[in-house]
Image (tube, rainbow, N blue to C red):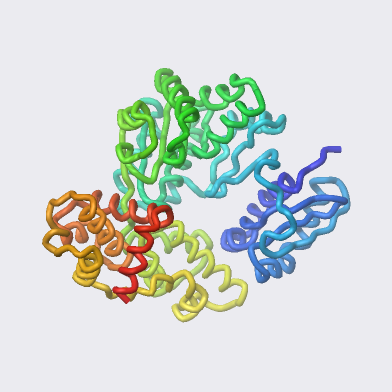
Amino acid sequence: MQTHSATDLLEIIKQQLCEQTNRPKYELLIRPLAAVSYEDDVLVISAANDMNRKWVLEQFGEIIIELTELITGRRASLEVVSGREGGIESPSSFSGMQHTDNGIEIPSAGTEQDEVVHRAQTTKPLLNPHYTFNEFVVGANNQFCYNACWQVAQRPGQSYNPMFLYGGVGLGKTHLMHAIGHEVWSSRRADNVVYVTSEKFTNDFIEHVRTGQRMSEFHRRYRQADVLLIDDIQFLSGKSETQSEFFHTFMELVEAGKQIIISSDRPPRTLKGMEERLISRFGMGLVADIADPSLETRVAILRQKARQEKVNLPDEVCYFIADRVTSNIRELEGALTRLLAFSDFSSSPPTIEFAARVLADILDTSGIRREVSMRQIINAVCEYFNISDSLLLSSNRSKRVALARMIAMYFAREFTNLTLSQIGSELGNRDHSTVSHGASKITAEIVEDPYIEQAISQISRMLK
C-alpha cells in the first residue's frame, strides 16, 4: 500500500476541499493549513490561530478524516494545533507537490513522484484555475500589459519574445502569466507549458548539483518547454551559477522559437546583482509595466470577485474598501475574502459598519489620515531631508534628493486619492511610470534598508 507523508496527504486533501468549498472559506481556513505529522494513522495539521483551529475542526474536521481514510485506505483520526506548533515538516523534507507564495502547486525536485508529475505537466499545466483572462479586471493601469499578454497567448514565440512584465507586489503579474498559460494550453497552441518561480528554479538547480543527479533531467524539465513562465526573476540576484544556467536555458528556448515570459518587481535595467548579458536579453523583446490600479479599477475588481462568490456586495462597501486598500490587488482581494468569510460565519450582512469592524487591523495600519494632501507630504519630506521644496521638484538627481522624491511618491501613492499622473504633475511634471517605479522601489526597500524604514516611520509620525 502506498505511504503518504503528512505534506503529500494534506495537499491532496486541499485539492479536494478547493473543489467543494466556497472560495472565501477556502482562502481563509484551508489554504493556510500546514502539515505537522502523519503517524500511526493520526494526521496532525496546524491552523493559523486558535480561532481558525476551532473553525477548521467544526466545519471541516469530519470531511478531512473521511478524505484521509479515502486516500490512505485506513481508518484515521485528526488533530489540529494552533500556530506552528508540533514540528511542521521542513521544506527540505517535502515530496510530491509544493505551493508557491501564490498557492500554485509545482513539482518538487528529486523524487520519483516528481518525475511522474512533470510528465503529466505536458498534458495539463499546473496553473491556478482562477488566474484566467476572463477573471482579470482590465483598467487604465494594466490595459497595455493585458493586450500584450493576450497577443502572446495567441501567437506564442512569435509576437513578443521574450516578454518581460514588471510592477509592484500584488498588481496582477502572476495572474497574467497564468492566463497566458491557460490560453495557449486550452487552444492547443503549446503542448508543454511550464510555470515556475525563480526560487523554485534555483532550488531545482541546487538540488540536482547537490545530489549529483543527472543535469539532463533538469534540462528536460525546463529546456523542452514550449512556453516557459518564470515569476519574480529578481530573486536570481546574486546567484551567479543559477543565472548562468538560466541564461543557457533562455538562449536555447529563444533560438528554438519557444516563448518565454518573465516577471519582476522592477524593470530590467534596475535589477541589481544580475548579469549584464541577462539584463540585455530581458529587454530584447517587449517590456511592459503594470501601474497601480485607480479607484474605479479597484471597485471593479471587488464587484467582480463578489459576483464570482454570488454575493450581493453593496456599492458603498466596495468603495469603502477600495478607498482604503489602494496599491495592492492581492491585499484588496484578501480584505474582501476575509469580509465575506466573517459575514458567512456570523450570518451578518456585509455593511460598512461590519466591514470596518472585521477589517480594522487591515484598513487602519498607517496611522495617517486619508485626507492628507500633496502639500503636507511635500512639506514633511522636505523637512525630514532638510531640503527645499523647489529642490525636490527640480531635475536634481543627487542621491539624497532622488531618495526624498521617491519617498514623496510613495506617500502620495499610498495616502492620497490622486492618480499616478496627478502625483507626477505635483512633483515636477514627472510621468506616471516614474512615479510607479519610485513608489514601488521604496515599498521594496522598506524591509531591507533600515535608513529608509526609519525615514518612512518618522515622516509617518509627522503626517499624523
Q: In this view, does 17 lie above or below 123?
A: below
Residue 425 spot, x, y in % from top left: 16, 59
Which one is in front, 440 or 139?
Answer: 440
Residue 272 at x, y percent in the picture: 36, 39
Classify residue 214 as left or right of residue 72: left
197 left or right of 121 in image: left
Quarter occupied by the N terminus:
top right
Residue at 39 percent across and 36 percent down: it is 273
Q: Residue at position x 59%, y 71% from top?
A: 344
Q: Quadrant of residue 464?
A: bottom left
Q: Where is residue 142 in the image (x, y as percent from the top left)?
A: 32, 49
Residue at the outermost bottom position: 353
Q: Residue at x 28, y 59 (%)?
A: 407
> Foreground residue, 281 or 454?
454
Please report the residue visible at 70 percent of the width from the left and 39 percent of the height from the top.
95
Whether residue 373 is situated above or below residue 235 in the rendered picture: below
How many numbered discs? 0
Q: In this view, does 107 lie above or below 338?
A: above
On screen, 409 above or below 348? above
Task: Please provide percent x and percent y for residue 375.
Answer: 19, 70
